[in-house]
Amino acid sequence: MTTDPFHILFDISLPLSPRTLRYQGDPSLTLTAGAHIDRGDPFTVSTLTLGLHTGTHLDFPSHFLKDDRDSSAFQPDRFLRQALVIDTGDVPVVSADCMDGAPVAAGDALLLRTSNSRRRLLHQDALREEGVVLSADAARWCVDAGVTMVGIDWLSVDGPDGGFPVHHILLEAGILVLEAIDLEKVPAGRYTLIALPLALQEAEASPVRALLLPPVHRDRR
Ligand SMILES: [Zn+2]
């Protein structure tokens, strides 16, 4: 058993490149070198353009709500969480029934491993198949359970049918939404989650590097 508190068990971030899966209409990622050592410049300096919802990212309340809870409103401890990964099996939609009895504690991040992970839907070369998302009653269950972050192995917590009820319910409650996490190899269980956004000010979302570490045992003296 490791005693290293920083032992990384899983990197659940998607690689960021022009090939990263995105919704049609979302801006594509470009990385362009203005100066490059291959062209005789003394150094390489690149410019990155990307939508803030590219790859693994956090949504803040201002993504859907007219309020001031944007990326500037959250202290870094909100991005370091005890986390529970639950496997929802083959359900077509994650409902409250899928979570009933889950040993989640107030303050936790709840990460949902759906059939999207087994089907490797985040690794499609283009968006051909829609992934499993949450139902509104599942979102309300998360609010009642007092979780502070909800993560899913798909581009969105909401389906494409409009209205975005899951985003609204979660973000109104101040629950951060972690989208496009890669849980393919991650067994259900307890972890420590690190999902740090850029220190970008006044943004509605940010790409994150998301890692799972061993759980913290708070009851040990
Ligand atoms: Zn988003």
Image (cartoon, grey):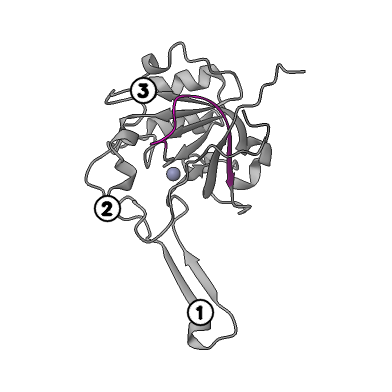
Name the element at disc 3.
loop
* The residue carrying mark 2 has its beta carbon less than 8 Å from ligand 1: no
Residue range of the region highlighted in magenta in the rendering = 183-196
- The answer to whether mark 2 and mark 3 are in CB contact below 8 A is no
Q: Residue at x 31, y 40 (%)?
A: 120
Q: Nearer the viewer, residue 2 or 177?
A: 2
Q: Quadrant of the N terminus?
A: top right
Identity, as a three-letter code, of the amino acid under mark 1? Gly
- The answer to whether mark 2 and mark 1 are in CB contact below 8 A is no
Identity, as a three-letter code, of the amino acid under mark 2? Asp
Q: Position of residue 170 (x, y in %)?
A: 48, 30
User: Which residue position holds label 3?
Assistant: 88
Q: Kindly indicate the quadrant of the structure image that contains residue 27.
A: bottom left
Outermost front residue: 1
User: Which residue position holds label 2?
Assistant: 125
Q: Residues within 10 Å of mark 1 (few under 14, many from 20)?
A: few
Q: Residue at x 37, y 42 (%)?
A: 155
Identity, as a three-letter code, of the amino acid under mark 3? Thr
Q: Nearer the viewer, residue 194 or 206?
A: 194
Q: CA distance from mark 1 to mark 3?
A: 46 Å
Q: Nearer the viewer, residue 144 or 172?
A: 144
Please indicate whether residue 110 sits to the left or right of residue 68 in the image.
left
Outermost right residue: 221
Q: Residues within 10 Å of mark 3 (few under 14, many from 20)?
A: some
Q: Is residue 124 magenta?
A: no
Q: CA distance from mark 2 to mark 3?
A: 25 Å
Q: Residues within 10 Å of mark 2 (few under 14, many from 20)?
A: few
Q: Return the disc, 1 or 3, that comes first in the chain's sequence.
A: 1
Name the element at disc 1.
strand
Q: Is residue 189 magenta?
A: yes
User: Which residue position holds label 1?
Assistant: 34
